[in-house]
C-alpha cells in the first residue's frame, strides 16, 4: 500500500509534463502560422508598394510630358503674340503717317461717298470719342471705354479702316459681340478688306469657333490681292487646334516673307 501511494505523485507529475509539452507545441504551431501569415502579408505589401511606386512614376512621367507640352504651347502662343504686337505697332506707325484728315464717318447717298476731304462734326466727334476710349483702355477702365465706343458707333457707319480700329478697341475692352459687328460693318462696305477678314478669323479663334475662323481665313485667301498676314492667322489657327508643328512652320514662313518685304 505504501508503494502504491508513492507512485501516484510521479504519475501525476508525468501527466503535467505531458500537458506542458503539448502546450509548447501548440504555441510553436500558432507562432509558425502567425509568422507565415505575417511574411505573406509583408510580401504582398512589398509587391503592392512596388506596383504603387511604378504607378506613381508613370503618373509623374505623364504629368511631366503634359507640362512640357503645355509649356511649349504657351511659349509658342507668347511668340505669336509678341510677333503680332510688333507687326501691329509697325502698321500703327504707318497709319499715323497717312493723311490725318481722312473722315471717320462713311456717308453714302445714292452710291456716292459724300464725306469729302474734311471731317464733318460727327466725324470729328467720333474721332474724339475713339481717342478717349483708347486712353480708357490703356488705363484699364474698360467699362468707360465701352461706353465711349458705343457712343461713337451711334454717330454713323464708320469708314472701313476706322471700323477695323473700333473692332480692335472693342476686342481689347472685352466686348467680342460689338467687335464682330464692327468687322461686319467694315466688310459690308468693303467685302475685300483683308485685314477685316483676318481680324474676324482671329476673333473666332479666340472664341474657339474654329469652323468659322477657317471660313474667314479662306475668304482672305480667295481675295484678288494677297495678304501675307494670312500665314500668321493660319499659325494661330493650327496652334489652337493643337498642331504645333504646322503652326511653327507657318510662322517661320511668315517671318521669312516679312524679312524679304519689310514694307
Image: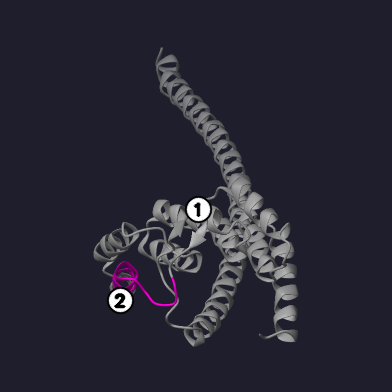
Q: Magenta includes 126?
A: yes
User: Which type of secondary structure does the marked residue at label 2 adopt?
Assistant: helix
Helix, strand or loop for the magenta stretch, by majority:
helix
**Left or right: where does residue 66 sit relative to residue 15?**
right
**Left or right: where does residue 155 sit relative to residue 49?**
left
Picture quarter with the C terminus: bottom right
Instruction: Return the residue nearer the eye: 55 or 114.
Output: 114
According to the picture, the residue beneath numbered tag 1 turns out to be 184
User: Is the Cβ of the residue at disc 1 closer than 8 Å to that at disc 2?
Assistant: no
Q: CA distance from mark 1 to mark 2?
A: 25 Å
Residue farthest front in this picture: 110
**Left or right: where does residue 21 sit relative to residue 128?**
right
Identify which residue is drawn at 60% across, 44% down.
Answer: 48
- The 10 Å Cα crowd at callout 1, few under 14, some 14 to 19, many 20 or more, is many
**Residue 198 place in picture, x, y as percent:** 60, 61
Instruction: Return the residue nearer the eye: 233 or 135.
Output: 135
Identify which residue is drawn at 32% across, 73% down.
Answer: 124
The stretch of residues the image draws in magenta is 116-128
Q: Which badge, 1 or 2, is on the more N-terminal residue?
A: 2
Above or below 146: residue 42: above
Above or below 223: residue 47: above
According to the picture, the residue beneath numbered tag 2 turns out to be 135
Q: Locate residue 84: give its quadrant.
A: bottom right
Amino acid at each position: 500500500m505504501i508503494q502504491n501511494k508513492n507512485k501516484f505523485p510521479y504519475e501525476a507529475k508525468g501527466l503535467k509534463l505531458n500537458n506542458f509539452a503539448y502546450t509548447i507545441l501548440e504555441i510553436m504551431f500558432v507562432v509558425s502560422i502567425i509568422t507565415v501569415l505575417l511574411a505573406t502579408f509583408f510580401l504582398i505589401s512589398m509587391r503592392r508598394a512596388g506596383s504603387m511606386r511604378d504607378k506613381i512614376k508613370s503618373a509623374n512621367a505623364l504629368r511631366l510630358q503634359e507640362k512640357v507640352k503645355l509649356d511649349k504651347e504657351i511659349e509658342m502662343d507668347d511668340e505669336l503674340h509678341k510677333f503680332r504686337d510688333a507687326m501691329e505697332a509697325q502698321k500703327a506707325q504707318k497709319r499715323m503717317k497717312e493723311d490725318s484728315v481722312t473722315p471717320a464717318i462713311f456717308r453714302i447717298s445714292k452710291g456716292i461717298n459724300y464725306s469729302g476731304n474734311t471731317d464733318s462734326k460727327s466725324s470729328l466727334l467720333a474721332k474724339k470719342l475713339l481717342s478717349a476710349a483708347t486712353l480708357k483702355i490703356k488705363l484699364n477702365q474698360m467699362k468707360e471705354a465701352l461706353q465711349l465706343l458705343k457712343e461713337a458707333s451711334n454717330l454713323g457707319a464708320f469708314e472701313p479702316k476706322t471700323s477695323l480700329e473700333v473692332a480692335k478697341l472693342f476686342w481689347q475692352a472685352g466686348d467680342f459681340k460689338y467687335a464682330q459687328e464692327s468687322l461686319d460693318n467694315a466688310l459690308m462696305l468693303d467685302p475685300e478688306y483683308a485685314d477685316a477678314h483676318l481680324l474676324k478669323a482671329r476673333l473666332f479663334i479666340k472664341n474657339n469657333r474654329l469652323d468659322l475662323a477657317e471660313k474667314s481665313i479662306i475668304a482672305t485667301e480667295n481675295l484678288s490681292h494677297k495678304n501675307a498676314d494670312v500665314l500668321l492667322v493660319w499659325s494661330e489657327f493650327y496652334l489652337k487646334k493643337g498642331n504645333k508643328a504646322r503652326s511653327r512652320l507657318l510662322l517661320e514662313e511668315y517671318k521669312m516673307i516679312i524679312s524679304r518685304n519689310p514694307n
